Amino acid sequence: MEMTIRWYGSKYDTVTLQQIRQIPGVKGVITTLYDTQPGEVWAQEKIHALKEEVEAAGLHIAGIESVNVADEIKYAGPDRDRLIDNYIETLANLGREDIHMVCYNFMPVFDWTRTELARKRPDGSTVLAYTQEAVDALDPQKLFDSVHDNSNGTVMPGWEPERLAHVQELFEKYQGIDEEKLFENLKYFLERIMPVCDKYDINMAIHPDDPAWPVFGLPRIITCKKNILRMMKMVDNPHNGVTFCSGSYGTNPDNDLPDMIRSLKGRIHFAHVRNLQFHTRTNFEEAAHLSADGSFDMYEIVKALIDIGFDGPIRPDHGRMIWGEVAMPGYGLYDRALGAAYINGLWEAIDKSERRDGARADGERPKWAPKFTG
Ligand SMILES: [Mn+2]
């Protein structure tokens, strides 16, 4: 695996590349052209300039999160072929710049949904949180407004004001789109983009729906093992893969995360690792990455990734807001750096104990030999 950090670009992120460079074990960033709209072609020169900026800071681009898919592709509007052509062109431009992993999602209208962006925890940190009751009581426009007003002056990914200015109209476009239709439209999209992915060796990594059930009556399909295996099979190409996001699949406590990871061997191209704390099935908040701080056994998640030989980029996901930092909710420096360090620690411990302890006779220890790095 390669430890990475998501970075929104110097114009949008409160975290700098120089800070990311100092997180132990991080050599790569997951980034995007944040000022592009879904459906727009990403010019190769712009990708190249971004790449040069990242490389000048001693890092590299390990993948893109996200190249967003236009809603019109998701609901199969009359303009979808042109928009898919543009998406193909963007993928070709990324491939020409030697970028080989693209995260995207296929959620109608809304990206991830949380009902609080700064729930206070007993230690004074704040986290994103979700209650079904709050969603049921809100209309989508109000939820959008509250996300917009509480994002510390940043633009939250997936909640761009341009896209969501006309929430109601968008909802109307999805009339008649059920789960089956959404699967069909996803299949159509994937079949059209696979040739360019084959040509440039681009791994497409679909992000799960978050939360992993329908909200506001909109269908959601990337939610569970059965559906994701259906998707892998319906376009059976290794470039059609997934982002395994423990915090998103984990919103449904019925999802056995280590089992899902094992069933997706060879198709996980990107991993988001984070923890949630459940109060009830439909009231949860994000926690520190550490197992003891939340509801998930993070050891088992990392172990499953090691067991399937996962070798793609991995990143800590939403962090808590701590130590007075003001940043995009979930995307501050401090708690994500702690998360990266924790995941790196789990990884090293599990990997070494399996490779070494598994191979050696009882009681035998490796020779103690500190490395001199010159
Ligand atoms: Mn995620």
Image (tube, rainbow, N blue to C red):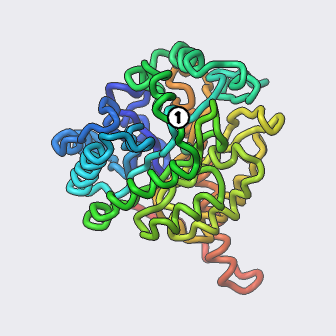
Return the residue found at the far bottom: 361
In the displayed structure, 40 sits above or below 123; it is below
In the displayed structure, 315 sits above or below 128; it is below
On screen, residue 47 versus residue 358, left or right, reads left
Determine whether the residue tagged by mark 1 lies in a helix, strand or loop: loop
The image quadrant that residue 274 belongs to is top right
State the residue at coordinates (29%, 48%): 81
Return the residue found at the far right: 280
The answer to whether residue 80 of the structure is visible from this angle is yes
Between 179 and 193, the one lying in front of the other is 179
The image quadrant that residue 140 belongs to is top right
The answer to whether residue 374 of the structure is visible from this angle is no
State the residue at coordinates (44%, 43%): 74
Between 348 and 87, the one lying in front of the other is 87
Residue 64: x %, y % from top left: 37, 47
Residue 183: x %, y % from top left: 51, 53
Between 320 and 242, the one lying in front of the other is 242
In the displayed structure, 93 sits above or below 323; it is below
On screen, residue 246 versus residue 201, left or right, reads right
Residue 190: x %, y % from top left: 39, 58
In the displayed structure, 86 sits above or below 12; it is below
State the residue at coordinates (20%, 45%): 48
